[in-house]
């Protein structure tokens, strides 16, 4: 390894670049021979292939990776190179970030009478609660969200309905689940979607929580649910 003086980072096999928090690693896939090779006649030898990877080693900074020779391999003594790997001059690292205005969101649907539900599964009562997800992102950050939670077993055909906390217990309501809705569309559980490409700065995304009837008959009890909203950006 000769790139940038061949200075190894704190991670084994990963070498430093000119950018803080960005390392470089070269790995090889063996060919169809073992070394050393003694060639008595002409022929073609499969030398395998090499992979160059960028590795995050710490807090990253944006910038252009210094171009130049990364690694080289040789037969016999140095100088008889059969492979040289270089980094071109157009390799750029863009570090984007997003921050949340709050780490938790709490929706309050209050007390809902069983009479507010319908006569069949699939009914959605009018009661709902809206909370805003606040994100402060760098320009051009691609924001993705994924709702992670347990699907309600009474709504096996609807992947957007959350199970109630303690569902099946005596003091927990029956025939009810919870949905989280964005832009008039229920969020499917464990399904990543693209939220938007950020123009930069603080933005608010309204999320709506509502009950969803999962059985023809609703029974009284506690009706709480929890889920995790996984937010990624790139």
Image (cartoon, rainbow, N blue to C red):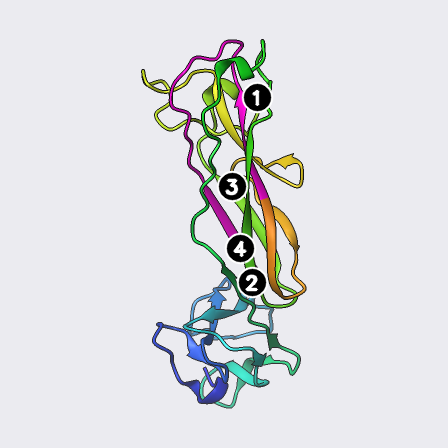
**Is residue 130 in sight in this rendering?**
yes
Which picture quadrant has residue 165?
Answer: top left
Which residue is disc 1 drawn over?
157
Question: What is the secondary structure assignment of the residue under circle 3?
Answer: strand
Is residue 116 depicted above or below 108 in this figure? above
Point out residue 77 in the picture as x, y percentages from the top left corner.
45, 88
Is residue 213 depicted above or below 46 in this figure? above
Which residue is disc 4 drawn over?
232
Task: Characterize the local packing of mark 3: few (<14), some (14-19) or many (20 or more) Cα atoms within 10 angstroms.
Answer: many
Badge 3 or badge 4: first in the primary sequence = 3
Badge 1 or badge 4: first in the primary sequence = 1
The residues bearing labels 3 and 4 have C-alpha atoms spaced at a distance of: 12 Å
Task: Characterize the local packing of mark 1: few (<14), some (14-19) or many (20 or more) Cα atoms within 10 angstroms.
Answer: few
Question: What is the secondary structure assignment of the residue under circle 4?
Answer: strand
Residue at point 52%, 17% (across, down): 214
Badge 4 or badge 2: first in the primary sequence = 2
Badge 3 or badge 1: first in the primary sequence = 3
Which residue is disc 3 drawn over?
147
The residues bearing labels 2 and 3 have C-alpha atoms spaced at a distance of: 20 Å
Query: Magenta segment, which residues?
Result: 207-233
């Amino acid at each position: 390894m000769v790139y940038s003086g061949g200075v190894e980072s704190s991670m084994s096999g990963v070498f430093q670049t000119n950018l803080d928090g960005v390392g470089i690693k070269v790995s090889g896939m063996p060919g169809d021979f073992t070394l050393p090779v003694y060639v008595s006649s002409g022929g073609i030898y499969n030398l395998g292939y090499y992979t160059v990877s960028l590795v995050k080693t710490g807090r990253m900074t944006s910038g252009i990776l210094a171009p130049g020779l990364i690694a080289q391999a040789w037969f016999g003594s140095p100088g008889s190179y059969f492979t040289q790997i270089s980094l071109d001059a157009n390799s750029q690292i863009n570090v984007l970030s997003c921050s949340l205005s709050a780490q938790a969101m709490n929706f309050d649907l209050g007390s809902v009478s069983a009479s507010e539900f319908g006569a069949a599964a699939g009914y959605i009562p009018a009661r709902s609660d809206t909370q805003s997800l606040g994100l402060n992102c760098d320009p051009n950050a691609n924001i993705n969200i994924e709702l992670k939670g347990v699907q309600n077993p009474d709504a096996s055909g609807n992947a957007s309905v959350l199970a109630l906390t303690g569902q099946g217990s005596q003091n927990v309501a029956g025939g009810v689940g919870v949905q989280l809705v964005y832009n008039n569309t229920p969020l499917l559980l464990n399904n990543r979607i693209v939220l938007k490409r950020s123009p930069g700065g603080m933005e608010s995304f309204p999320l709506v929580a509502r009950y969803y009837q999962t059985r023809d008959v609703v029974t009284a009890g506690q009706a709480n649910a929890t889920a995790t909203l996984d937010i990624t950006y790139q």
